[in-house]
Amino acid sequence: MAVAALHTAATGLSALNTQLDVIANNLANVNTNGFKASRVNFEDLLYQEKAQPGVMNANGDESPAGIFVGLGTRVANTDPSFVQGSPIDTSQPLDMMIDGNGFFRVERPESPGGYAYTRAGNFFTNGDGEVVLGNRNGPRLADGLTIPDDATSITILRDGTVEISLAGGGTSQSNIQLTTFINSKGLRPIGGNLWEETAASGPATEVEPGQTGAGEIIQGFLEASNADPVTELVEMIKAQRAFEMNSQSIQAADQALQVVANLRR
């Protein structure tokens, strides 16, 4: 009956509302370094089986198909895209971009294992010379990289080697490691350009840049957001049209129920 149509259309409106929320977040982060856009995956709900396929009909033949009425849709999951964003040349010595797979690891005591992970490479130093991520909380880079006060130049090689020239003519050297996951889509976004490890992502694996499937580090560049404004606007228009059609389904079901109610008069 039309009552089922009302509930079915309502599930569509609810799911499309979530999709619009995700699209709005993608558009809001088109200028966020290392941001990864997400898409919404939908799945259909249960079906009412009004007639089974393959049963004998009045002519003694098997019915070629049955009658199934679906009960709507729901959001199955949000699927982040880890397609690499465009490189942005900043010429800043502590700006780093990962060319390929992997994440920078930063210290975050409240996260599993005490670490969080990021694709944003906008690093600078704090008051103690420690290299920190340029978000609101400024978590320290987990490799313990510190820039001395008398540093005159910083060179970061593609393999993660950091060479620091000192004013007295000496040098200091350290290394930056990257982190990879079996299933990056299973990471939990926690804001601040950070992701957390989960059971779905698999354990974090520390690797040297350029080794074991990890990307290389490029100094003086940042990775731009991979959210494409044109694509997001097209998806938003499609979601709006689908929302309107589901609204019309509700209106049509309501009109049908009014006709049924008027039969008593």
Image (cartoon, grey):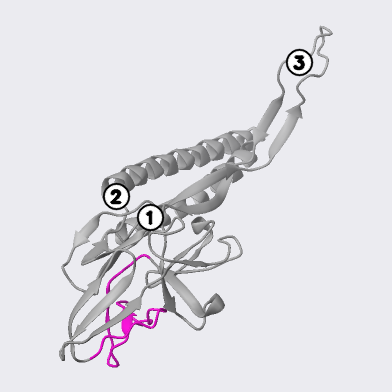
Question: Mark 3 or mark 1, which has the lower sequence index?
Answer: 1
Q: Residue 53: give x, y in percent of width and height.
A: 75, 22
Q: CA distance from mark 3 to mark 1?
A: 46 Å
Does 139 lie within the magenta span? yes
Name of the residue lying farthest toward the top: 59
* Disc 2 residue crowd, few under 14, some 14–19, many 20+, Cα 10 Å: few
Question: Mark 1 or mark 2, which has the lower sequence index?
Answer: 1
Element marked by disc 2: loop
Q: Residue under label 2, please give it.
A: 228
Where is 120 relative to 37, above or below?
A: below
Q: Mark 3 touching mark 1, by CB under 8 A? A: no
- Could you tell me which quadrant the N terminus lies in? top right
Q: Residue under label 1, please give it.
A: 37
Q: Residue 175: give x, y in percent of width and height.
A: 36, 75
Question: Mark 3 or mark 2, which has the lower sequence index?
Answer: 3
Q: Return the residue nearer the eye: 110 or 128.
A: 128
Amino acid at dot 1: Ala
* Residue 198, image quadrant: bottom right
- Residue 265 shows up from this direction: no
- Could you tell me which quadrant the C terminus lies in? top right
Q: Which residues are magenta?
A: 119-148
Element marked by disc 3: loop
- Kindly identify the residue that appears in the image at 41 percent across and 41 percent down: 244
Where is 43 relative to 178, above or below?
A: above
Q: Residue under label 3, please give it.
A: 63
Amino acid at dot 3: Ser
Total marks in image? 3
Q: Mark 1 touching mark 2, by CB under 8 A? A: yes
Is label 3 or label 1 in front? 1
